[in-house]
Structures are given as structure tokens and as C-alpha cells.
Amino acid sequence: MNQHLNNPSRAAALTLKSLEGLISEEERRELAALLAADASARATYYDSIAAYIGLNFMGILSELDAADSAFLDQRLWKALSESEKSAPAVSVDKPSDRPLVVPIERIQREKTAYRFNKVSFYTAIASLAALVFLLVFIRFAPITVPRDVATLTDSLNAQWDESGGPLKNGMRLMTNVDPMLLRKGIVQILFDNNARVTIEGPAEFGILDNDRLKLNYGRVYAVAPKEAMGFSVVTPNALIIDLGTEFGVQADLYGSTELHVLQGRTTLVAGRSKDKVSLVVDEGAAKRILRSASEVVDITLDEQIFARHIDSQTNFVWRGESVLDLADLVGGGNGFGTGQIESAIDPLTGTHGMYRSLDRRSDGRYVSVDGNPYIDGVFVPQGAQPQMVSSVGHIFEECPPTNGVYYVEIIHGSGRYLADYQPDEPLGQLGGKVYGEPDYPSLFMHANTGITFDLDAIRSATPGVSVTGFTAEAGLSSRSPRQGNADFWVLVDGQVRFSRRNVRDKGQVFDIAVPLNKTDRFLTLATTDGGDVDRPGTEFGLATDSDWCVFARPVLELVEG
């Protein structure tokens, strides 16, 4: 909040700076707000101007009794000149061509001493102060009426300063009001010119105009389409002007500013008064403007430091990541590492929780997953009847017959809590790497299991971002207890886009890459038992025995635009 508001002393200080030509643009706006809001500030403003003029004339006043040849300084003459220019014309009669004869008569007069009338002089000074007041007020402190120019479109875990009251989604935001203080959380604001900003707390900011945001501190990511070209962000020591870009700005409490240009280019104006520097910052570059200085230094571009988009309905936050982790979605996360590792979804019921090492049989029904908008449903491939793989009825025509049995749920992780593991045993690997770790996430999908992801739901959470493909590394775990035999499937809208049949080599990895276009709706991953037959009455006689199928690093590729 502005601690100087309704403070006559502040008004006097700002008025003096304006008269000396030292006032900044932000101080000029502050002075305008003070004068608009407080009558005492306006009175102080008038008195300050009068006092300023009086001080300028102080040397003249001390000599007025001794001489009548003093002149007012250049400011006064300039003000009077401007007043004369705007004065109405006065008609003057044209003089006669005939010479006028005037009789000359000498008159003796008594010489009198000149007396200066101070009352008249100070009256003139007050009148002049009023004139200067009008001139300076118009130039330096234009009163603007607050107007709504933007909308708070979304907020995620936002906590606002109590004095300003909470802001809610859909509220219109005004210019020329006290700064807004976001203590924590993330908010998204859409200006009427279609410029979009995402602000992450803690942050203090304000709307200066329909194309300008003031950031006292915090982080903001701005996206300015062509119609919003020229959108700008102002910090205490910098001005960033959009030239058709996406850029992030970070202003810290110590007075430094960072600019990261992700797309296009910007104009950066740094420093104050005569030390100002101006330069163009292109895509891929980043700059730091040091506190109270015009020094600009190069820094490394950080493409993921700024929140670019949020979706409060799904707790979705996108920071420019190039991939979205499907395993993380299975763990109840947002695709960027927030999911619970070693949690799972039951393909028989669609519920999310822990997992069990227990053979269970299904009739192949497709089951929805409640509470997770990114996962359309799950199933156990059965093959004896048409296998549905989406909520709109897509059929997996090539689904082979299976025994309809699954041993464990679909796991986000390595399956380290399976009953087959002994304490302190090494975890399973693919291609020599332990899967199910944060740096090598995985979906453990023991045959027979299937899961379908809703690509449209993912797209709606990341507007402006295209899903261009699915990639993964897959294979049988090196920790499969015995010899396995399984099939790997990738389907899009029920159509097979990738398959690898009868995989038997443990620990060996193969790559999967499936292009996706904007019309593709559902992505399905499935594993089946490889066509083995059950051997009733024998130990480990089920066709699914040791079919430890793993999709490592199963991700959707994201491209902005």
C-alpha cells in the first residue's frame, strides 16, 4: 500500500522536485493521486509553489527598498509570456496622419522618494503563483479517473493482503488505485487489449494503464499478441516495452530487476535521469539491471522460472516445460512432478491408492477414473469381446485374447513394494538405469492392464501449447522373477500406432515415438500377456507370470504455439 497517500509533506516534496525538473514518471503519477484524493495536499501544493517562487525572489526582495531596477527570474518571465500569448486581442485605434502639435510648458515639481508597496507586490506574487500552479499542475500532475482495463481470469492458492481485501476470479481491475499485494499463490490477468500476464507471489503490483503494469517486486510473465504490441512492465529501476513477445520480469526487494525474453524482442530502458540506457533485448537473451544504477549485465536465460499458465480447476501450473510426464498424472500429479510416487490406479475399479501383489480377474469393462480429468479410464484387456478403450466408445480391434488376469495395479514408480521384492534387494532396471526414480519416471504396467489419457483435457489446461507426440522407453524389468512374454501397445483414438509383440528379454529397452496432431483425442497404453496359455495346477502357471512391463519416461512432447 502507498504509505505516502494523504501526506501533505510528501506532496510538498514532490512539488519541489517537479519545479526543479527532477521528478520521475512514477513520482508524477503519485503526485497526481495525492492531489486528486486530498484537499490538504492540494493546499500544500499551492503553498509550496508560492514558497518556491518567494525563495527564488528572496535576493530581489532584500534590495527592493534601495533600487527599483530588479527583475524577476526567467521562470516568471516565461510564465508571463505564456499568459500573454493566450490573452485576448485588444483593438487599438489607428493614429491620424496629421502631426499633432503639443504645446510645451516647463513645470517645476518637487522630487519625491519612491516607496515600494509590499502588499501590492505580494498580491502580485500570489496571483503569479496561481498562474504557475495551473501551468505546473497541468504539466506535472494530470488527474486521471480510475477505470477498469483488465480482468482477473484465474487464481491458484492466492492469498491477498487483508487491507486490500480478497480479489476473486472475474473481478475487473482498475488503474490509478493502490498497489495490490499478493502474499502467495499465482494469478492470471487478461488486459482488454488481450495482453495476458501471470503473476506469482509474493508480489506487489498495480495497473497503470490499459497497456502498462507496475511491478514493485515479484515475478510476472507477459504474453502480448500483435494487437497488444507496446505493452510494458515498469519496475523501480527499469521499463520493459513489448515488441511482439513473451517475456518474464523479476523484481526483487533489493531493487534489482531481471528480464528474460522467451519469444520475440523487447526494448529495455534502465537507470534514471541522465544515466538512462536503452537497448533491444532479443529472443533467448536475459539481462539483470542492478539496483539504483543503469548498469545492465548479461545473465543466463531461465526458461522455467516463471509460471506461464495456471488452471485452478485442476491445480495445473505450466512453467514452459517441454514434456508432460504421464506417470506423474497416474500418481495424481499435474504432469510436472507433483504426483505421489508408488501410488497406483486399480484397472478394475478406477480408484487411486496403493497396490497389492495379487492375481485378479476382470471381464474387460472400461472404467472411468473419478477425480482425475487427465485420465479418461482404465481397463484389463480381455480380447474375448470387443475391447472398449475410451469413454466415447473407441474399440481396440487388434486386442489379442488374454486370460483376463492382472497381478498388480498401474503404478507410478518402480513397484518396489511388490511382494516379489526382498528387503534391500536392488530395484529393477531398463537399459542399465533404475526406473521409477524422479530423474527416470516410469509406469509399471504388469500385463494385462490398459490406461487411456484425455489429450483434450491436457490441451485445455495449457492453452497456447500444442501436444506434438508421445515418447517412452519400454521393456521387461530386469527384476522379472522368471521368464516373461508380453506385448506392448500404443493406441490413438482406438487405432494402433505402435506395438511390440512377444517381448522376452529382461532389462532390454526399446524406444517408442508416436506423433500426435491437434485432432487426436485419446492416447491409450496397454500391455497383454503375449499369447501364453494358463497351466492350471502348476506353480506360476498363469499366462501373465513375470510379465513386468515398464514404460520408462512416458511423456507427451509440448511445443508452444
Image (cartoon, grey):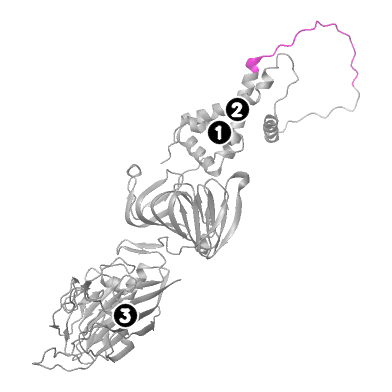
> Magenta segment: does it hold 288?
no
Q: Give the residue at x 58% y 36%.
A: 18
Element assignment for label 2: helix
129 is higher (above) or lower (below) than 513: above
Q: Position of residue 545 (x, y in %)?
A: 18, 87
Q: Position of residue 343 (x, y in %)?
A: 22, 71
Q: State if disc 3 and disc 1 touch (CB < 8 Å).
A: no
Q: Give the residue at x 42% y 37%.
A: 3
Left or right: 411 as drawn, with respect to 490? left
- Point out which mark residue 15 bears: 1
Provide the residue span drawn in magenta: 100-120
> Residue farthest to the left?
537
Q: Position of residue 501 (x, y in %)?
A: 29, 92
Q: Position of residue 187 (x, y in %)?
A: 37, 56
Element assignment for label 1: helix
Q: Residues within 10 Å of mark 2 (few under 14, many from 20)?
A: some
Q: Check disc 2 and give the amino acid type.
A: Tyr
Between the residue at mark 3 and the residue at mark 2, the CA separation in whole angstroms equals 75 Å
319 is higher (above) or lower (below) than 75: below
213 is higher (above) or lower (below) than 8: below
Residue, disc 3: 523
> Residue farthest to the front?
424
Quarter occupied by residue 336: bottom left
Q: Residues within 10 Å of mark 1 (few under 14, many from 20)?
A: many
Residue 519 appearing in the image: no
Q: State if disc 1 and disc 2 touch (CB < 8 Å).
A: yes
Residue, disc 2: 52
Left or right: 544 as drawn, with respect to 234? left
For marks 2 and 1 on the same chain, the one whose residue lies earlier in the sequence: 1
